Amino acid sequence: MRHSKINGLNSRSTTLRAAIVPTAFLLFVGIVFLVYLLHIDSSNSHTNTSELIKETPFENLHPEFENSYYIDVYNDNSTDQLKEKNTIFLSDANNPIYLEFAEVGSSTQVIMVLYYDYVPIKFSIDGKNYVESYTFDATDSMKVTIPVFLDEEQLNRDDALHKLFVTFTVSPNHHAAEYDRVTNFYGANAVYDLVYSLSSMEPVFESEKQHDYFIPDGNHMDSFSPLTLNTDYGAKELIENDGILRPEPLIEHKQGTPFKLMYFLDKSEASNTLLIITINFSQAKVNGKNYYALSLDGNAGTAYGEIEIALPNEPGMYEIIGYAIQNPFSPITSDKVLVDSSYRFTLNLT
């Protein structure tokens, strides 16, 4: 259905260019990400690559929220101690990592994308190989458990601390342009530490040590939404009116010209933040790099700047989403395991 619900917002919504004001009011409209830690029976061994996907009733512990999403990631090694550290211990490639997702309040198509050290990774499910994403149907109040086997050739089995970034995005078969206003509530995302040995863990994986950090163009003392991408070049709305504009549901752009966006992110006293931008749910180059790492001042408030996004060669309608991962190269803390996404909009490339 063209006008079916997408994250609690329907086609009759009317706000197009509402300015975002301090207090992050959008975080309190029934949005909740539910992360539950499950007890895993360590005696249950899985030694093949064809374990089946399961769908079971989801126990909603927060019925006061009309719409919500749930995400959890674990494997057979997931002890209480490792769960507290948001760490996946991958000791055996023959054992899967379990990815769980549920949504309450709607039934939609969902696309799952996996990143290893912040770049897409191949994986297999039930003996079938996937390049970087897997699409499935999610039923209201039903939990989907997906056993995933990561591509062994892409894994760096060393003593370093690696990262597994997981995104679940609803309604990939719809465009944000079909609706009257944009939303940043369309799924659940989380990042976990991934290790192959418990005896020794370096602080970060090797590629981070060779990475360049960029400094934001400016800072603002107030906090707004976690991440906004728009075309308000020069941050005029922020400077003149102390607000941030949401992007239009549809942005037009001509091929052959640079596509630049402004980013506005909540610093949350982080020392650095990593931006990942996707086009139609695939990672796009940002200023020529797979991801864009920002060095922050450690204060609260908003950092902002301009970035250039590499575009596809073919004209068409593309969904644009950004993710902001705070302190991405440090051990994941409980308040950083969930990853914020930007307002989703459609790019019409002509």
Image (cartoon, grey):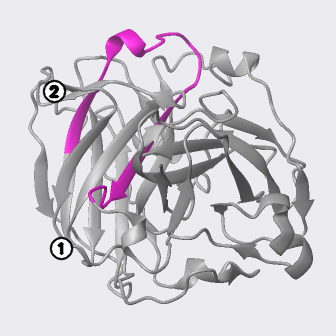
- SS for tag 2? loop
Mark 1 Cα within 10 Å, few/some/many (few <14, many 20+)?
few
Q: Amino acid at mark 1?
A: Met
Vertical placement of 350 versus 246: above or below? above
**Distance between mark 2 and mark 1 Cα atoms:** 39 Å
Report the residue at 12% width, 55% height from top: 55
Residue 158 in percent (x, y) is at: 52, 10
What residue is drawn where x is 81% and y is 74%? 237
Q: Say above or below: 29 vs 309.
A: below
Which range is magenta? 146-173
Residue 53 occupies quadrant: top left
Membership of 185 in magenta stretch: no
* Residue that mark 1 sits on: 1
Q: Residue at x 90, y 59 (%)?
A: 219
User: Mark 1 and mark 2 in contact (Cβ < 8 Å)?
Assistant: no
**Three-letter amino acid code at disc 2?**
His
Q: Which one is in front in this view, the residue at disc 2 or the one at disc 1? A: 1
Residue 112 in view, yes or no: yes
On screen, residue 212 versus residue 19, left or right, reads: right
Tell me the residue that label 2 is attached to: 46
Residue 88 located left or right of residue 142: right
Specify whether residue 222 is in view: no
